[in-house]
Image (cartoon, rainbow, N blue to C red):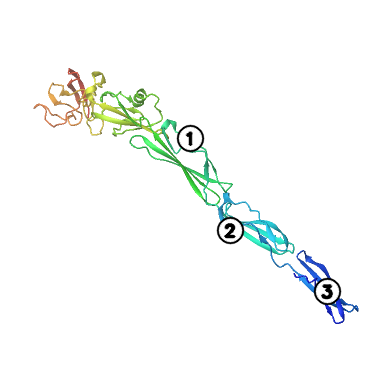
Amino acid sequence: MQVLSDSTAVDNCGAAAVIFTETTTPGTCAGSYTITRTWAATDLCDNTTVHVQTITVQDTTAPSFVEVLPSNVTVECSAVPTPVVLTATDNCGTASVVFAETSTPGACEGSYTITRTWTAIDLCNISTIHTQIITVQDTTAPTLVGTLTPVINVTCSAIPVEPTLQFVDNCSTLVNTVYTTSTSDPDDEGNYEIIRTWTVTDACGNPATFTQLVNVTIPNFVSSTGIGTVCNIDVDLVIDLMAIVTLQFPGTPTGGTWQDTDNTGALDGSNFTPYEIDNGEYVFTYVIDDVDCPRTIRVIVPVSYEACTVENCVSIIVHNAMTPNGDALNEIFFIENINITECYPENTVEIYNRWGVKVYDAENYDNTTRVFTGISEGRSTVKQSAELPTGTYFYILKYKTLEGNYVTKNGYLYLSR
């Protein structure tokens, strides 16, 4: 503003003096007011000329921020910046800064928008506003608290229980955890795997997977044992296979399952009856169906009549009555156990009528293909192939025993039609 307080005046009749005055009238704010300036020129005769200047002062310029203004950013929920402190200046006086912040929820707990506003206001309420938009997101999966051993090698009797794990997330207060486990079948060497998996997800759906592999070894996965050759003509012989297993492998669980591997048909539970089983070597399998330590034990049992002794042989029993009348009862002369050639490798049978005439003879009598049915197969005094009459006959049985001795049995045979 140019102040003209030093103005002068002239008068036609002499000198003139100038008097300057100035007043200020306040406005609505510190930067708004009115200045009134008056010049009064007076000559020697008190003639006066007055000039008035009115200056209206106003503030129309907004304040300015001093610091660098924060820009819009996108950040993780764990990296939200703290608000900066801003100051401002004004051309007509001082200015103050007011800070405000609002938050708008997003699709999940770790996703939202922050709006920060700084308002600089001068003395005349003229303002300058700066707004910063912070986009907060959650792209980080949960993490494990502590450590997890990724691979463990153990025997089946020392499998550790699954650990209790804790997880945290940078944004979510709750973490969803899904635990699964899978177990493979043992291979031929008795090795299998347990895979433990923890799948964790935060509130924004960010997943993380943690895995533990347990390599399991089954000692003695497949074991074999056996006994010496057993006799197959001893009707009373029963072999307890479980006793063989527990003797060979102490501590073996007894709740397993026995399998007749070679389909002998002679296994009842753990009891094997070798009577009348063909010569050979037979395998029986004991399966221990333990969840962690399944095992298989093979018991090999050789069977042969060569292992038999005289004591193993059943006795020869002669049934000395027969009724060959077609009713399917007692139709033949039945010599019990004569067909067991392992015990009685040779035999002869002769049958005579009451007059001493031979009506039947055979070698290696076996009750089936060589058998007396009451039909004459004898001499000229008896018609061959004729039915023999009811009566008393006399038999002579000779047989060779296992040890090579010959035994003779004779007696009466009663035939009735």
Instruction: Out of 37 and 220, give the one closest to the viewer.
Output: 37
Per the image, label 3 sits on a secondary structure element best described as strand
Tell me if residue 376 comes above or below residue 185 in the rendering: above
Q: Which residue is mark 1?
A: 161
Residue at image position (49%, 47%) is 208
- The amino acid type of the residue labelled 1 equals Val
Res 336 seen here: no
Res 28 seen here: yes
Task: Please state which of the two labelled residues, at mark 1 or mark 3, is closer to the viewer.
Answer: 3
Instruction: Out of 140 and 67, give the one closest to the viewer.
Output: 67
Residue at image position (74%, 62%) is 123
- The amino acid type of the residue labelled 3 equals Trp
User: Residue 363, how many percent across, how many down?
Assistant: 14, 26
Q: CA distance from mark 1 to mark 2?
A: 50 Å
Q: Are marks 3 and 2 in contact (CB under 8 Å)?
A: no
The residue positioned farthest toward the left in the image shown: 380
Task: Please state which of the two labelled residues, at mark 3 or mark 2, is closer to the viewer.
Answer: 3
User: Residue 61, how many percent across, how many down?
Assistant: 69, 66
Tell me if residue 90 comes above or below residue 84 in the rendering: below
**Few, some or many C-alpha atoms within 10 Å of disc 3 (few <14, some 14-19, many ≥20)?**
many
Q: Which residue is mark 2?
A: 72
169 displayed left or right of 92: left
Q: How many numbered discs sit on the rendered protein?
A: 3
- The amino acid type of the residue labelled 2 equals Asn
Instruction: Out of 12 and 38, give the one closest to the viewer.
Output: 12
Q: Are marks 1 and 3 in contact (CB under 8 Å)?
A: no
Task: Please state which of the two labelled residues, at mark 1 or mark 2, is closer to the viewer.
Answer: 2
For marks 1 and 2 on the same chain, the one whose residue lies earlier in the sequence: 2
What numbered label is drawn on residue 39?
Answer: 3
Q: Quadrant of the N terminus?
A: bottom right
Instruction: Out of 303 and 118, give the one closest to the viewer.
Output: 118
